[in-house]
Image: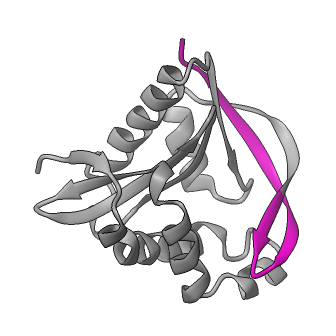
Amino acid sequence: MPVDLRPATENDVAAIATIWESGWRDGHLGNVPDELAALRTPDTFRDRAAGRVADTTVAVIDTQVAGFVMVVGDEVEQVYVAAAHRGGGVSGTLLAEAERLVASGGHPVAWLAVVPGNARARRFYERNGWTDDGGFLHEAPDAGRTVMVPCLRYVKQIA
């Protein structure tokens, strides 16, 4: 099925939040501190999605939001695809769009954070030319608190 990309709108917030929460739980539970998992509720995903519409691009299949990507500056902050659309090329399309957006912003290198235990995501990024540039502590804010999360910084030369 063809994948259409477009900027997110306020009407997409519920779909983005649902995809984000489900995908985040799939890739992060057991791989991040329990304190962060407890803070990440359906309401926090809705609030975060609503606040990030301006930096979000959605992938649409048959009028349904199938996934999204959030880009700020040189960072690809979020890449998530609904479970029903995984394995169909949506994630690759979104990642390519994220790389295009980073490059169009004048950045020669894109980066993203991934938790070490999220093997599926790490394999996906590596298949798409991203490399592990080492570990760092990511500040994950949620519900007025910040939790430090060990992450890997993945990078890709894009220009």
Looking at the rendering, the stretch of residues picked out in magenta corresponds to: 139-159
- Whether residue 143 is in magenta: the answer is yes
Q: Is residue 84 visible?
A: yes
Residue 158 is situated, as x and y percent measured from the top left of the image, at 54, 18
Q: Say which residue appears at 38% left-offset and 48% top-offset.
A: 91
Q: Determine whether 33 is above or below 52 in the image.
A: below
Residue 157 is situated, as x and y percent measured from the top left of the image, at 60, 17
The one nearer the camera, 81 or 44, is: 44
Relative placement, left or right, of 143 versus 12 is right
Quadrant of the image containing the C terminus: top right
Q: Determine whether 85 is above or below 35 in the image.
A: above
Relative placement, left or right, of 88 versus 47 is left
Q: Say which residue appears at 67% left-offset and 81% top-offset.
A: 40
Q: Main structural element of the magenta stretch: helix, strand or loop? A: strand
Q: Is residue 83 visible?
A: no
Q: Determine whether 123 is above or below 68 in the image.
A: above
